[in-house]
Image: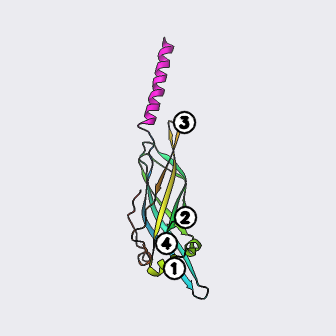
Amino acid sequence: MCLVVALCVAIALVLLGVILALTVFKPRHPITNVDSVRLQNMSLAMDIFSMSVNVNLTLEVDVSVNNPNKLGFNYYNSFAQLNYKGQLIGEAPIPNGDILAEEIKGLNLTLIVMADRLVSNSNVTKDVALGSLPLNTLVRIFCQVNILGFMKFYVASTSSPKIPHFLDFKNLYKGAKLSPFTSI
């Protein structure tokens, strides 16, 4: 009789654990926001004789990651990208780390612009002459949530805001912040 009661209690505890894991502790996607983009370094040179433009840009990107889960998670293989009219022109890896339950963690990234990809686009010269570049960012976070030590769930978050009013060289050169950005 005691064995039957112990078995029923064990089954009830396992069932309760599974129900809690799938309801209260159900993993939710983290929310990523690009808070600001600042120009860290810029050099622009035009060679009239060879008809070429040399551009070097380094951007500082502030990203916040909000963990809405009741449990912490580990993030890995994550990245931020910069696109010009749909073409990848810059990227920065996001170092692996962890975020506690219901925490908002700020990440400061240095995004290197691949000048050769930017300059190879035929529209960039026209946009530079107009004084702005239509850029957007993409932040992708891959996470692993462990529930009860043996149940693993994988979630991801993507944020892809456009830099408002195009990228104005005059404001960037002064180090002005372009913010706030919102997550989609």
The residue where tag 3 is placed is 150
Task: Say if 154 sits above or below 170 in the image.
Answer: above
- Residue kind at label 1, given as amino acid type: Thr
Magenta residue check for 162 = no
Q: Secondary structure at mark 4?
A: strand
At a point 57% along the width and 73% down the height, the residue shown is 115
- How far is mark 1 from mark 3, CA to CA? 55 Å
Q: Circle 4 is placed at which residue position?
A: 40
Mark 3 surroundings: few (<14), some (14-19) or many (≥20) residues within 10 A: few
Question: Circle 1 sits on which residue?
Answer: 125
Check the image and report above or below for 126 versus 72. Answer: below
Which numbered disc, 1 or 2, marks the residue closer to the eye? 1
Kind of residue at disc 2: Glu
Spatial CA distance of label 2 from label 3 is 34 Å
Helix, strand or loop for the magenta stretch, by majority? helix
- The percent position of residue 155, horizontal first and vertical second, equals 50, 47
Secondary structure category for the residue under label 3: loop
Closer to the observer: label 1 or label 4?
Answer: 1
The quadrant of the image that shows the C terminus is bottom left
The earlier-in-sequence mark between 1 and 2 is 2
* Residue at the outermost right position: 50
